[in-house]
Image (cartoon, rainbow, N blue to C red):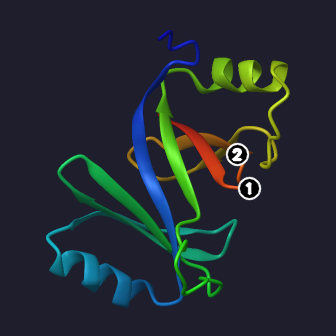
Amino acid sequence: MENKYGIVGVAHVGLPTNDLQKTVEFYKSLGFEVIMQSYNEKAGEKVAFLQIENYCIETFENGQAAMSDGAYQHVALDVEDIESMYQKIRNEKYTIITDGIEELPFWENGVKFFMIKGPNEERIEFCQKL
């Protein structure tokens, strides 16, 4: 199958929480390692990235976690070229739910990303670490 979008893997799964420290401690007890903690000023949220092997969770304290089955908020896919990906997604009329390509000061050099809606109202993030 052709990979016309340049998706290179799953970056992370997004998990909202009402208590970041409790969530971090839970996943650490399962063997996850905190690989980054930050503060998303735009959203006003504390954020932690937890990793075990090749699986990464982005958990963010937003005070709006559903606290029920289906609690994950989004899946993020790594892409090679975020600008090219964005143009392809726009041209094919997917429903973009972010304000274009956005940036956050996560990781060493930042990250660019945007999100679309999937067929089940799920959020799909495309991101490129800079």
Say what amino acid the circle numbered 2 marks: Gly
* Residue at numbered disc 2: 118
Q: Label 2 crowding class (10 Å Cα cut-off): few <14, some 14-19, many 20+?
A: few
Of 96 and 21, the residue lying toward us: 96
Image-quadrant location for residue 34: bottom left
Image-quadrant location for residue 116: top right
Side (left or right) of 83 relative to 17: right
Query: Where residue 97 appears, x then y in whole percent?
Result: 80, 49
Q: Label 1 crowding class (10 Å Cα cut-off): few <14, some 14-19, many 20+?
A: few
Residue 38 visible from this viewpoint: yes
Mark 2 falls on what kind of element?
Answer: loop
Residue 129 visible from this viewpoint: no
Side (left or right) of 106 relative to 62: left
Q: Which mark is residue 121?
A: 1
> Which residue is at 81% across, 21% downward?
92
Say what amino acid the circle numbered 1 marks: Glu
Contact, CB < 8 Å: mark 2 with mark 1?
yes
Side (left or right) of 1 relative to 37: right
> Which residue is at 64% across, 69% downward?
41
